[in-house]
């Protein structure tokens, strides 16, 4: 029996969810490290240390600044490189511009080199876990779900929230595309737990029953 652990850290002024996902092998995957403040990075690294974890994957559901701000600190510390969709490469590389536009802030660091690009149906592995990549454009061009079929867990980034969906009015966003993406992910089993980029966790079934944007 696998023992997958999911630890959520709510970080930065936009209350973004960064997740550390680990299992009995002690390997772990860090998803969407948007940590802004030193104490947020500290909380994440303390958790990793206290649980003897070994970060082997730094995965991004998309490349908005509030999901990638802490990637440099994490990747430097654990000598890993981030993986994301190639369709969000420009967004990732324009991190400084995003910070100026949304936060009126100048950053004094560049983002680490990308370790690899992921696309639909790729498998992201760590420990005994396998997450399938599901492309979910709409919030950004390169948005993805990470779906673990065995554990019935999905990380939805900013595509799907409890009772809501991601904004589509940013550059690269598309209401048409996000509706297509949602139509696809609602084919997942009802009892799949969904861990979004902001807000509380939910399930596919709950969202189908209550989220005004969804239908099968």
Image (tube, rainbow, N blue to C red):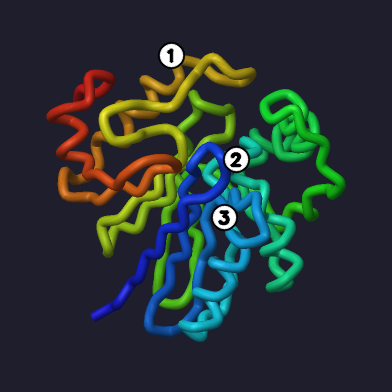
> Who comes first in sequence, dot 2 or dot 3?
3
Residue hosting label 1: 176
| Residue 66, label in figure | 2
Q: Position of residue 1 (x, y in %)?
A: 23, 80
Could you tell me which secondary element the residue under label 2 belongs to? Answer: helix
Residue hosting label 3: 59
Q: Are marks 2 and 3 in contact (CB under 8 Å)?
A: no
> In this image, 206 relative to 26: left or right?
left
Q: Residues within 10 Å of mark 1 (few under 14, many from 20)?
A: few
Q: How many marks?
A: 3
Which of 123 and 29 lies nearest the eye of the viewer?
29
Q: Residue at x 76, y 67 (%)?
A: 76
Which of 140 and 40 lies nearest the eye of the viewer?
40
Q: Position of residue 124 (x, y in %)?
A: 50, 60
Could you tell me which secondary element the residue under label 1 belongs to? Answer: helix
Could you tell me which secondary element the residue under label 3 belongs to? Answer: strand
> In this image, 210 relative to 153: left or right?
left
Q: For the residues marked 1 and 3, what is the alpha-carbon distance in whole angstroms?
A: 26 Å
Q: Residue furthest front?
A: 39
> Who comes first in sequence, dot 1 or dot 3?
3
> Who comes first in sequence, dot 2 or dot 1?
2
């Amino acid at each position: 029996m696998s023992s997958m652990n999911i630890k959520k850290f709510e970080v930065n002024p936009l209350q973004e969810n960064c997740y550390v996902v680990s299992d009995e092998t002690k390997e772990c995957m860090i998803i969407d490290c948007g940590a802004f403040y030193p104490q947020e990075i500290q909380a994440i690294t303390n958790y990793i240390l206290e649980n003897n974890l070994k970060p082997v994957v730094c995965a991004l559901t998309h490349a908005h600044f509030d999901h990638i701000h802490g990637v440099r600190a994490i990747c430097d510390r654990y000598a890993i490189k981030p993986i994301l969709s190639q369709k969000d490469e420009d967004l990732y590389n324009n991190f400084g511009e995003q910070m100026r536009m949304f936060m009126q802030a100048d950053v004094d660091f560049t983002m680490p080199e990308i370790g690899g690009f992921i696309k639909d149906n790729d498998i992201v592995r760590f420990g005994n876990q396998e997450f399938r990549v599901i492309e979910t454009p709409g919030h950004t061009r390169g948005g993805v779900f990470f779906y673990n079929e065995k554990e019935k867990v999905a990380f939805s980034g900013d595509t799907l929230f409890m009772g809501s969906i991601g904004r589509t009015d940013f550059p690269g966003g598309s209401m048409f595309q996000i509706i297509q993406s949602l139509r696809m992910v609602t084919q997942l089993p009802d009892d799949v737990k969904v861990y979004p980029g902001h807000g509380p966790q939910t399930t596919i079934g709950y969202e189908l029953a209550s989220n005004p944007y969804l239908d099968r």
